[in-house]
Image (tube, grey):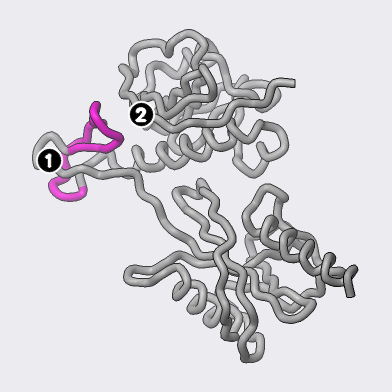
Amino acid sequence: MIAAPDFAPDYALLDPAEAPARGALVFPFIGQKLLLGPDAALPFPRMLQELGPPGRAFCFGALGEQRCVLQIWLADLAIPPHLSIGDYRALWGQWPVGHLAAFVRARQLAAWVLHNRHCGVCGQVMNLCRAEIACECPACGYKAYPRISPVAIGLVCKGDEILLARSPHFAPGMYSALAGFVEAGESAEDCLRREIREEAGIEIRNLRYFDSQSWPYPHSLMLGFIADYHGGELIAQESEIEDLGWFRFDDLPALPHPGSLARRMIEAIRAAWAGKTRRS
């Protein structure tokens, strides 16, 4: 069995009026909405013809020998009936990992293009650079590069329990680790200490880096840490947290998708706890 190819990022500016090269994988966006064809598959170029030419087009990477092309329609067009809107979470389990990685990059770059149609310095219309992945102002020369927003996410451990919380926008019954955006001048570790203090009322210690994950909502980079409880009583921040608590590893609530960084942290710590329990 041949393994699915990994995604390799790249950049090459294309003429929006020209059809993509034969065999290319086209990721079409109306604004920040990915368009899909039947069976949650990427549409063929002919399925997009009634939309007219896109406002921006460029190659953003490759899956094996196939170039990945991003086409963005800047106007809020009606979605043709034979197409649908794709969501990253819904595509987990349906798309290979390489295709999901390509979607993450495409979604973030689509947001970047839309947010930089005009220069933030002088207000002129921006152009995509040919030599590098940047939007450049032809009037003042200002360049805007793709934005990355770091988020610290932490799984706090206390004996046989971990701290989990739920936000009002989570799926019913689902709990996850606490997280927050890194503010100017903060380290990721300082951000996590602050966020857990603000959202849960407790202090943490012994932070250990776990892993990272690009998250396309719309341009986040999740930085995962494992930490130990250090002190304090749980007090949920009412404006952010619907519920939180300490959960035993053998009695956990509904958890995030297995492909998420939060779930991978939970499973890694639960596996370590299970192995320790068997040995004792």
- Residue 132 position within the rendered picture, expressed as x and y whole percent measured from the top left: 26, 33
Badge 2 is on which residue?
A: 11
Between marks 1 and 2 in the image, the one whose residue lies nearer the viewer: 2
Q: Quadrant of the C terminus?
A: bottom right
**Front position in the image: 279 or 277:** 279
Q: Of all residues shown, which one is farthest toward the front?
A: 279
Disc 1 versus disc 2: distance between alpha carbons? 20 Å
Marker disc for residue 125: none
The amino acid pointed to by label 2 is: Tyr
| Residue 174 belongs to the span the image colors magenta | no
Q: Residue at x 81, y 67 (%)?
A: 252
Q: SS for tag 1?
A: loop
**Front position in the image: 34 or 131:** 131
The amino acid pointed to by label 1 is: Gly
Q: Residue at x 34, y 18 (%)?
A: 16
- Residue 89 position within the rendered picture, expressed as x and y whole percent measured from the top left: 64, 44
Q: Residue at x 60, y 39 (%)?
A: 87
Badge 1 is on which residue?
A: 141
